[in-house]
Amino acid sequence: MHRRFLPLLLLLLGAALPAVAQQAPASAFFPYPMKVDRLPNGLTVVRVPFNSPGLIAYQTVVRVGSRNEVESGKTGFAHFFEHMMFKGTKNFPEGEREKVISTYGYDDNAFTADDITVYHSYGPTAGLAKLVEIEADRFRNLEYSEPSFQTEALAVLGEYHKNAAQPYLKIEEEMARTVFSKHTYGHTTLGYYDDIKAMPQAYQYSRTFFERWYTPDNVLLIVVGDFNDDSLMQAVRTHYGPWDRKSASVTVPTEPPQTKERSVHIDWPQSTQPRHIHAWRSPAARLDTSDAALQTVLSDYLVGPTSPLYKELVLDKQLAQQIYGDYSIHRDPHLFGLVAVLQDEGHRGPVRSAFDAAVKELASGKVDAARVEAIKSNTRYGLLMEMETAKSVATTLSWYAGVYGTPDALARHYQKVSEVKPADLVAFARKYLTAPNRTVLTLSSAGGKK
């Protein structure tokens, strides 16, 4: 599966960590103690003891996604490798790993995003030693034949066709193509269609991709749950220690500034509700600025369920089935968006005007400080409520650690959320939510309401 820009569907590490363990205490933003080791080969190992008797979550975060696909004609390989990583090794040929996993009863899968690929297993602590062995083996020693590669390439093409039957992929593709002319965010995690069709002929390149990015210094291993730390680390050092590749360095093209408004329209051939999207170029997620935290708050402030826009467009006038903010953290500058799923094509004008008015009001300096504080509080407690299982803790840690590149990113991000001031939202709106910096995407349905 792949993780998309639209939120309806759910390189190198930064500062070097010491080779000896560091323990971060629990905090208001991440309420569990965390231990972190960095092995001599660069592998970062994060452990979080969690009250889940007999259960562990085991996640491997590879800092590679569609962002890294800089070579012409070679898009979609980060997602493709999510598939190939299940193909086996000499020690555990194809199918053998799955037998071991099923014997212990692990829930086992993976996802690919613009910036990261995450492999996740969840199940009994009793199988942890074997899981360490089998996961280290496939990351060090993945093997697959050219016929197996070609078969899986056709499966990926089939996945594209399946996703293309819904409007979300087309929306994502057209928005990315319109906004990004240079940066690799201009293609989705699935890749360009022509590149996917050509994948069966790219066997040799696929091996290069694996050796380039599946390296210990480009990976974070995150284990959450009920485990003995000494035994776990002994197994990790034994099985991951000999892994000795070094990650590549590529230059991701910088996107030039946008100087005038852009637009793109989609005529969807099947029946679906019309869509209207405003998206603005916005700063990258970095821990030395508050830009990402601010956008997290701004999304709810403008179109969340407590916003005047939601009350007007969804509840009172019923012009839209739903409205929501479209923002997720990215390593490089990406997008901040407002999305409306319209009740009827004829409502597009009033919805666009309402979006414009809400942004204009914020940029004028009018901001509801009490609602900003309520959103910050709700965001914080919502995060805490979501982290109720070892799996949910590991998944949330993996996302923030993978994009930001440091194990403590989750706590630091939400610390910054708590520090957002009403005036920050105003300043952001004035700087970024401008007409020249905006892209408007519209989707109409040939078989839908007009």
Image (spheres, helix red, strand yellow):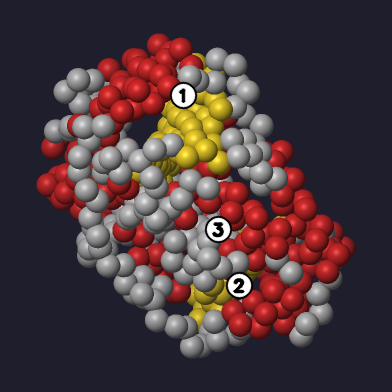
Specify which label sits upstream in the sequence, 3 or 2.
2
Of the two numbered discs 3 and 1 in the rendering, the one whose residue sits closer to the viewer: 1
The amino acid type found where label 1 is placed reads Asp
Up-down relation of residue 67 to residue 56 (above or below): below
Q: Position of residue 388 (x, y in %)?
A: 66, 32
Q: Do tag 3 and tag 1 residues touch (Cβ < 8 Å)?
A: no
**Does residue 216 appear left or right of residue 120 in this picture?**
left
**Picture residue at 23% right of the left edge, 55% below the top:** 248
Specify which label sits upstream in the sequence, 2 or 1.
1
| Helix, strand or loop at mark 1 | helix
Up-down relation of residue 120 to residue 175 (above or below): above
**Picture residue at 62% right of the left edge, 35% below the top:** 32
- Foreground: 80 or 58? 58
The amino acid type found where label 3 is placed reads Ser
- Residue occupied by mark 2: 278
- Residue occupied by mark 1: 229
**Picture residue at 59% right of the left edge, 35% below the top:** 33
The quarter of the image holding the N terminus is top left
The quarter of the image holding the C terminus is bottom right
Of the two numbered discs 3 and 2 in the rendering, the one whose residue sits closer to the viewer: 3
Mark carried by residue 328? 3
| Helix, strand or loop at mark 2 | strand
Q: Position of residue 378 (x, y in %)?
A: 77, 51
